[in-house]
Amino acid sequence: MRVIIQSDPSTVGIWTARHIAEAIRMAASQNKPFILGLATGSTPIPTYAELVRMHKEEGLSFAHVTTFNMDEYVGLPQEHPESYHSFMWKNLFSHIDIPHGNVNILNGNANDLLQECANYERLIAAAGGIDLFLGGIGVDGHLAFNEPFSSLSSRTRVMNLTIDTRIVNSRFFDGDINAVPKQALTVGVATVCDARQVVLLATGYAKATALKHTVEGEVSHVWTASALQMHPDAIIVCDEPASDNLKVSTYKYFKEIETER
Ligand code: GLP
């Protein structure tokens, strides 16, 4: 695991966008498609803003990129401003040249949710698997919507959201927890870990405990992001406040080794 410690959310976004852009350009130079897993939440917004800037000012093209989003609420209309469909079009897809047919987001209003989830796994496999999965982390350490005690072997499925997650996410629903859907569709921990590379973002002190468990704790279904310790190519990009609960020795180790790269 690599841990890249940046000063603030903006520099986390710039580092991550450059990293993703390099991978996209590398695939393009080899005439290969690039399969990108994407996350929602406030944390990846600076990354998406930088990717949009690179598209507009530096000609970064998404023409050969196919995306798979991590999750979507169940029962929230797609046109609702807080659906993850709306989020992705507002923050990224509307501003870049990705072909609409290359965008994949789980349909939380499908008649058969189990079928929708099984089909999503099939679509990912048919695309050849995910090259890079970009993720965030919940305050409780959840990866995508894999709440505490999710199996680390889990696949795309319906998830009941915890009260804690609904309280945290109520900030997007005028502070009304009752307006936050009780369920979501989410890729599983194993779906994320199947990606050839996973890049996890964490910014702000609110994520410091979750980050400590993810980096220094045991691999455990209590903090599902800790499964990344088993991944051969996981990169955590965090800011200084999110790194606050790491041991001084851990902090120094990653600072030194990344400076030397
Ligand atoms: C939601 C999403 C997660 C995201 C988390 C953190 O629960 N399902 O994928 O990582 O929020 O959100 P934020 O980045 O706003 O802190």
Image: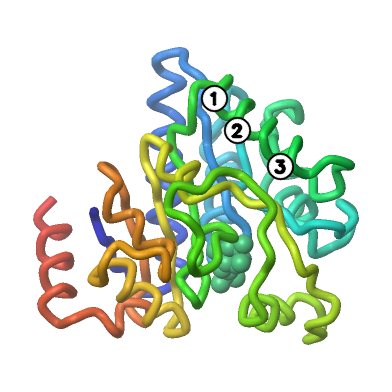
The local secondary structure at tag 3 comes to: loop
Other-residue count near label 2 (Cα within 10 Å), few / some / many at <14 / 14–19 / ≥20: some
Establish if 201 lies above or below 93.
below
Does residue 42 appear in this view?
no
Residue at position x 55%, y 33% in the image: 59
Residue at position x 89%, y 42% in the image: 111
Mark 1 and 2 residues: CB-CB less than 8 Å, in contact? yes
**In which of the image's four quarters is ligand 1 placed?**
bottom right
Calculate the distance from the C-alpha at mark 2 to the C-alpha at mark 3. 12 Å
Q: Image quarter for residue 251? A: bottom left
Disc 2 or disc 3, which is closer to the eye? 2
Please state the horizontal and vertical placement of residue 204, each as a whole percent of the image. Answer: 45, 79
Please state the horizontal and vertical placement of residue 14, each as a whole percent of the image. Answer: 43, 57
Other-residue count near label 1 (Cα within 10 Å), few / some / many at <14 / 14–19 / ≥20: few
Which residue type does callout 3 highlight? Ile
Disc 3 or disc 1, which is closer to the eye? 1
Judged left or right of residue 16, residue 50 is right
Of the residues under marks 2 and 3, which one precedes in the sequence?
3
Which residue type does callout 1 highlight? Ala
Judged left or right of residue 213, residue 225 is right
Residue at position x 60%, y 33% in the image: 121
Please state the horizontal and vertical placement of residue 199, each as a whole percent of the image. Answer: 40, 51
Of the residues under marks 3 and 1, which one precedes in the sequence?
3
Report which residue position mark 2 lands on. Answer: 121
Establish if 26 lies above or below 83.
above
Report which residue position mark 1 lands on. Answer: 125
Calculate the distance from the C-alpha at mark 1 to the C-alpha at mark 2. 6 Å
Residue at position x 69%, y 36% in the image: 104
Please state the horizontal and vertical placement of residue 82, each as a whole percent of the image. Answer: 79, 64
Report which residue position mark 3 lands on. Answer: 105
Viewer-proximal residue among 22 and 80: 80
Mark 3 and 1 residues: CB-CB less than 8 Å, in contact? no
